[in-house]
Amino acid sequence: MEQKKTKTRILERKNEVISGLKSFGTKLYDQLDQGVFPTINMPSRSTENINYDPVLRQFILGDKSVSRSARNIRHVKPFTQLAWAAMFSNELTTQRKTSTLRDVYYSAQAYEMTFTDQQESNNIITDLETVTGYSREDFNIFPEERSAVFGDLTIEYTVPGYEGRTMNLTSHPDGVLIGPALTSSEFAGTSADKVIAIEKGGLFTRFIEENVHRKHNALLVMTGGQAPRQTRQFIRRLHDELNLPVYILTDGDPWGMHIAMVIIAGSANAAHLRELNTPDAKWSGVWATDIVNYKLPTDPLDEVDIKRLYELQKDPRYKDDPLWQREIKTFLKIKRKAEQEAFSRYGLTYIVDEYLPTKLEETK
Amino acid sequence: MAQATFEEISASDFFYRNRDIAGFTNPSRAIFAAIRELVENSLDAAESLKIPPDVYVRLSFEGEASKDTQIYTLRVEDNGSGIQPKHIPSAFGQVLFGSKYKLKQMRGTFGLGGKMAVLYGQIMTHKPAYITSSTGAAKIYSFKLMIDIQRNRPIILDRKVLINKEQWRGTIVEFSLEGDYLRAMPKIIEYFKQTALVNPYANLTFVDPKGRLYKFTRATTHMPEPPKETLPHPYGVDVELLQRLIQVTPYKTMPEFLKHHFHRVGDITAQKFLDFSGLSPSKNPKKLSHEEVVKLMQMLKRFKEFLPPDASCLSPLGEELLKAGIVKELKPEYVVVHQRKPATYAGHPFIIELGIAYGGEVPKKGSFVIYRFANKIPLLYDEASDVSFKVINAMNWRRYKASPDMPIAIVVHICSTKVPYKTVGKEFIADRPEVKREVANALREAGRQLQHFLSRREHVDKERKRLSIFSKYLPKIAQFSTTLAGKEKLPDIERLLKSVQKYGAEED
Ligand SMILES: Nc1ncnc2c1ncn2[C@@H]1O[C@H](COP(=O)(O)OP(=O)(O)OP(=O)(O)O)[C@@H](O)[C@H]1O
Ligand SMILES: [Mg+2]
């Protein structure tokens, strides 16, 4: 097996994150020490300030910024929460511990900093991302979402207790959970030459059973519906650090189509962050035109599906791309949708042996 | 041919048959009405001498009467003027006999209240009433009376004269009546409380049938200026009154008649009025035909140049006493009082006094608590029909920063020689436009002051809340940033905390 060793990025980035948090703390400290109310500026995340950047091929925040001042009665509480979140994140990163968003919500209570609800605490974490430019995963804060990876990739752990240990991601046939230990690992080598991201767990398992990773020399990623941010970031790393092209397989409906799009072009919610998306990734199917060409068993599009298609038609990520526009139009014309499982009508291996190679070739 | 029978009924008989209109509607209402009529007579009697009243009321259980009613003995004792012995039997035994028909503000007006109580007791129990009274002179007179309902005359069953060694002055009324005290109790207690509010210079004591003592102690011995008697104002006369005056007048010409029997009529005004009305000045008033009397009444009302009545016949509480009463009985956090200048309706002078109480022991009810008074009498029934209720509810309270879910009580007092009651039961004030306007103006004035108070309070509250928010969070920011920056020493935030107090509400 051919092995490629990537450069060490993980530890470098951790150090950047820690010094970023520290400098944020120092800024607040110095202002207080000089007898002024601490104030911070950060880019505004309001919809008017979210623009699609065709060069970067993702959403970015515009020039508008907002200012938060501890002098303002309405700001002082969220300001304090933000300072707490920074301190908490600093603790996590320096002590190399991880935490879920839920943990964050509860941990605040120990400091008499009770958040009204989970949403409020999530928002503060997003503020911290915006202020520092790092993502919550950089602070070792993860949502409780499940996604997995399988294939010939050897990783080298950096988490405490596992430092330097390696593992090959074919070692467990259910796939390996994409969690903090995995995403903080260095890539130590792979023989794969592509990544195939799959929306659903069922098909992911089938692909492993059918040896797709070997037949197609691929790393398989299961997104579990809309891909979690850490998974999107992970796919980006696979693409950037290992130079692997990325193909995405979803259901043939507007929702599946958009799962692919978020992996490719990112989401407006993460406009304040970079490198969560993979602009070069390809949506390989199931397309609306595949439904027609392969005569797949279908269900009719319902009202929300159609409404969603009209929305996507105007979305900047879709607007100037002939492929996406063509697929949206086809969906609207045939008014049908099909799941990936629909290929089973041609036998259980058809999708692996016939459909997949054709589509990989077509979207190369 | 059948003979129609005509029957003349006496005044006592009339009121007996129509006791509803005087407030003796049912056993619980009757017991309340009896107490209230006697207490009001006592307060009048003390006030007429400008003596701070001491009124003692005792209701004691005598026996069961029916399933829901009992027989009680009611005894009311006061330190008032007392009654001339020759008037005692009529004062308590002859309906429409009273000393209060002159024009000045008093509680009693109809010459009816005390007798209705006695009459009601007599009808239900067939027992006599006992009246003991002295004007402070050498003797005390004691009468045992019943009322001859058909003839509207007192029947004197016994009469005693005692030597007044201690120079006691006052009146004691005692009689039996049937009623339902348990049901009447809340209203009776409320009546005493509100009477104490509007008579802050009175001591009121009530001992109920269970032996419970309710004591309302005066907060002051200051009393309002007593009212002066006046003549009727030309705008307020009716044919009935004109005819009575014509009967008793010694004057032989119209100008003399007008001058001596009417308020605000002098030589010149009389002359001008006679010119205006076309009535001959030399006419003897006794010779006026019925048509001429009616015309005289109409012309008096139409003539524009009579000055409005002066208000010396009124005896309002005044702002200070009203405030004292409110503070004493409602124990609010804040009170504002306002007295309007005298106004008139249909020739009758009146004054509106008003108070608004906020917070303290004033309850939060979801609506304003309204206390209504007329000539220092609390009005406890039919609130929703009262003019004040309507005016209060029509006000835009938001403009004054007030809302019904705040602990706010509104006290409205109307003083007049003729309170515009809608019924003989003296329960609520009719909505005469003049009265309505005065109540509204008084509310606005008091409302503005309430608004100042509420804004100030809101401001103080906000400041306090503000400071508490900053004192909660700034130290935390200091702590978190110190840890984060890896420093040893916390930054000094005292200066920042101090400065917070000075900002005011700038970020609203
Ligand atoms: N406690 C008292 N002390 C002195 N005088 C009294 C007392 N009670 C009654 N009187 C006299 O008896 C009269 C009749 O009283 P009553 O209550 O029947 O009528 P009123 O008070 O004149 O009018 P109203 O019907 O409005 O009560 C009074 O006008 C008053 O002169
Ligand atoms: Mg009376």
Image (spheres, coloured by chain):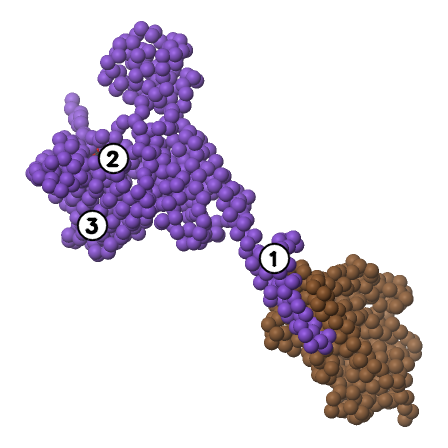
Chain colours: A brown, B purple
**Which class describes the residues within 10 Å of circle 1: few (<14), some (14-19), or many (20+)?**
some
Which chain's residue wears label 2?
A: B
Mark 1 lies on a secondary structure that is helix
Q: What residue would you read off at disc 1?
A: B501
Q: Nearer the viewer, mark 2 or mark 1?
A: 1
Q: Is residue B32 above or below residue B262?
A: below
Q: What residue would you read off at disc 2?
A: B49
Mark 2 lies on a secondary structure that is loop
Q: Quadrant of ligand 1?
A: top left
Which chain's residue wears label 3?
A: B
Mark 2 close to ligand 1, CB under 8 Å: no
Q: As shown in the figure, which amino acid type bears the numbered disc 2?
A: Leu
Q: As shown in the figure, which amino acid type bears the numbered disc 1?
A: Gln
- Kindly identify which numbered label has been placed on residue B59: 3
Q: CA distance from mark 2 to mark 1?
A: 57 Å
In front: B141, or A196? B141
In front: A188, or A213? A188
Residue at image position (85%, 89%) is A188
